[in-house]
Amino acid sequence: MLESIKVTERLHWPELELSKKYLLSPTEKPISVSQFGFHSLSSSILKDVFTTGTSSYNVLLQTKEEKKNPKPSSAYHKKCRKFPKSSPTTHGKEPRKTNTPQPLPAKEWATRHSAIIVRGCFPNKSKLTRTINVTGSTMGLSPRPRSRTKKFYCSGLQKTKLSLLPKTQAKEGENSLKKLCILTAIKPSNVEKEKAKFFKSEFTYNPQFEYANPASPPVLARHNSASDRFLRQAVRIMELALQKYGNYEKFEQATGGSLLTKSRIWYHVKKYMEKEGCMGEIVVHLTDDLLSRASMTVVNGRPTLTINISSAREHWLEGMLRHEIGTHYFRGINNNLQPWCNGNGRIKYSLKPTNPTEEGLASIHSVLFRKDPFLWRAALLYYTVYQASRMSFTDLFRCLGKFVKDPSTRWDYCVRAKRGQTNTSLPGCFGKDQVYLDGILKILRYREKINFSLLTALGKVSYEDVDRLKEIAMMENVRIPYFLQDQCRYMEQLNKIMEVNQITDAELQVLI
């Protein structure tokens, strides 16, 4: 039904490797991977562009499965790069459906997909303008030409191996893999087994989590801390929602609407991608094996959006797409255009950490345009992490009962906060989830001074770095999401978020 979206039921590797899927045309001549120039792409760029520290659960599953499914030998790659030539008689006619896949020519492939991950990785010798050239949205702009290619599958094209990269790029790729190591290490391998024990004990058993490759104690210690800086605000936000709706379940039903079927999820994703002009750029997976609502990552060199079907509600889904595509994806591809697109560049220009700006901005976009834009999820995550740092698993579970009644939902929040621990009867937490509310409040504090279009155009940067980076930024071909193109309406929505959550400027000025 959808030409550019590939959907699978669960986040598991199929027998045919996902790296073997490409958009192809049956009428063009074959090329090799080396002709296109993937050897010049930094592995760290591909892996760092969309993966954020808190959208981790999907990354963990993918990383673990990659270890189980080693890639074919180099001899196999060379063999598979040879393709049969297409028949010249097919030119100018409607391509006949066939089971024989054909590759896309280098020139056309580069033209269609350079905006995704390639354009920012090659030196641009032409003189760049200082004005923002927005592409990718149909809102008040000239529409991008629509691709008419059909989707075919080819087993010959493979992702460039790290060993084939230059030494400097290979080193960057290894550093990127080390960054993902903590996310892999803190994923318990016996979650379902411990969940069964916990529920059987009537919530009195503290889970004993096991890990396939546990993180070292010093690494866990660095993440085992929580702040109470915005605890009062987090509690107030949740209490306001409960005062209006009675309990979280009623709030979820009233503001989120009904759960969507898979076909409706596909429809809304396609509609949103058309609005943003990014059809065909992102692979989409549906799963119910995800602690977060969705995550944007890179799998085998391709931007991949994974959606949790158990939390995909009719009024919340577009907010999730603004979070993952309109924020993480667009800031990621814009980042590739900039001189700070890799680790060395970030050091050279003394960039501040991407978070809390990245997740704070994405979380704001999740509730943008809602009738009641309560910051419930960000507040609950902040509160849960703080309490986990002081409580056992069972105590934390009972503590969350005042805000969330459903046992399965409470279990998920507790597991998120206790990731990395073995004996959950002891106090301890994984503190990353506090970054959402932290980022939201800091952005709202300086909302009048922030140029939000520029913050998106500059890529993965902090709002604190925008003013000093704008003079050296590459502004040609940046992508701005549709909802940022009306700045007046956008600012009205930020003020509404503050009003609904009873956050005042005076309060923020004292806190931040």
Image (spheres, rainbow, N blue to C red):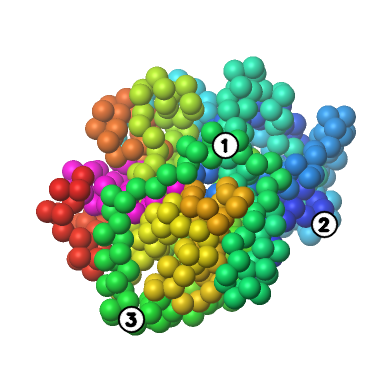
Extent of the magenta region: 431-456
Q: Is residue 194 above or below residue 435?
A: below
Considering the numbered disc 3 on the image, is that residue within a helix, a strand or a loop? helix
Which residue matches tag 2?
98
Looking at the rendered image, the disc whose residue lies closer to the viewer, 1 or 3, is 1
Amino acid identity at mark 1: Pro
| Residue plotted at (34% across, 54% down) | 437
Which residue matches tag 1?
217
- By secondary structure, the bulk of the magenta-drawn segment is best described as helix
Q: Earlier in the sequence, mark 1 or mark 2?
A: 2
Q: Is residue 196 visible?
A: yes
- The total of numbered circles placed on residues is 3
Decide if residue 15 is on the left or right side of residue 460: right
Q: Earlier in the sequence, mark 1 or mark 3?
A: 1
- Counting from the top left corner in percent of width and height, residue 240 is at 27, 72
Q: Marks 3 and 2, how far apart in space? A: 55 Å
- Counting from the top left corner in percent of width and height, residue 14 is at 78, 55
- Counting from the top left corner in percent of width and height, residue 373 is at 31, 68
Decide if residue 265 is on the left or right side of residue 157: left
Residue 245: which disc? 3
Q: Marks 1 and 2, how far apart in space? A: 55 Å
Considering the numbered disc 2 on the image, is that residue within a helix, a strand or a loop? loop
| Residue plotted at (40% across, 82% down) | 250
- Quadrant where the C terminus sits is top left
The crowd level at tag 3 (other Cα within 10 Å; few <14, some 14-19, many 20+) is some
Q: Which of the 4 image quarters holds residue 260?
A: bottom right
Amino acid identity at mark 3: Tyr
